Image (spheres, helix red, strand yellow):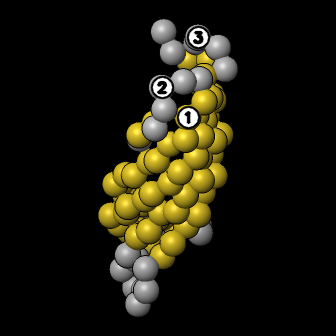
Amino acid sequence: EYNFLRGRFSPLLRAGLGCYDITDNAGYWTTYGETDFSWNVGGGFRWNATDHLVLKLVGGASWTELKNSSSTAQFGFVTLSIGASF
């Protein structure tokens, strides 16, 4: 994650790598499961509301290649994070 400014309010960019674990538990047993590599990008804003309270609003997209699909799956996201800094 990269914050562009050092002030209390800053735009930010985010990029990451990870994985999706997709499991179908339709009954008492697992009928289908796969784990796939994923990548994501996003952008948003960071606000240091006080010296110790941080709020972030970020939106973006994540992509993965599912095993039995001919195209890349895309998922959008919006997150609101509340954190503390010391």
> The residue under label 3 is which amino acid type?
Asp
- Give the residue pinned by disc 3: 51
- State yes or no: discs 2 and 1 in contact (Cβ < 8 Å): yes
Taking the spot 41% from the left edge, 90% from the top edge, the residue there is 70
Q: Using a 10 Å C-alpha cutoff, classify the residue at mark 2 as few (fewer than 14 neighbours), some (14 to 19) or many (20 or more).
A: few
Vertical relation: 69 (above or below) 77 = below
What x and y, as percent, mark residue 84? 56, 17
Vertical relation: 83 (above or below) 67 = above
Taking the spot 37% from the left edge, 51% from the top edge, the residue there is 16
- Mark number, residue 10: 1
Q: Quadrant of the N terminus?
A: top left
- State yes or no: discs 3 and 2 in contact (Cβ < 8 Å): no
> The residue under label 2 is which amino acid type?
Arg
Q: CA distance from mark 2 to mark 1?
A: 7 Å
Residue 69 seen in the figure: yes
Q: Nearer the viewer, residue 66 or 39?
A: 39
What x and y, as percent, mark residue 74? 51, 72
Look at the numbered disc 1 and give the secondary structure of its residue: strand
- State yes or no: discs 1 and 3 in contact (Cβ < 8 Å): no
- Give the residue pinned by disc 2: 6
What x and y, as percent, mark residue 49? 66, 20
Q: Nearer the viewer, residue 22 or 6?
A: 6
Left or right side of 55 for 42: left
Q: CA distance from mark 1 to mark 3?
A: 15 Å
Question: If you read the primary sequence from the N terminus, does the residue marked by circle 3 or circle 2 appear first?
Answer: 2
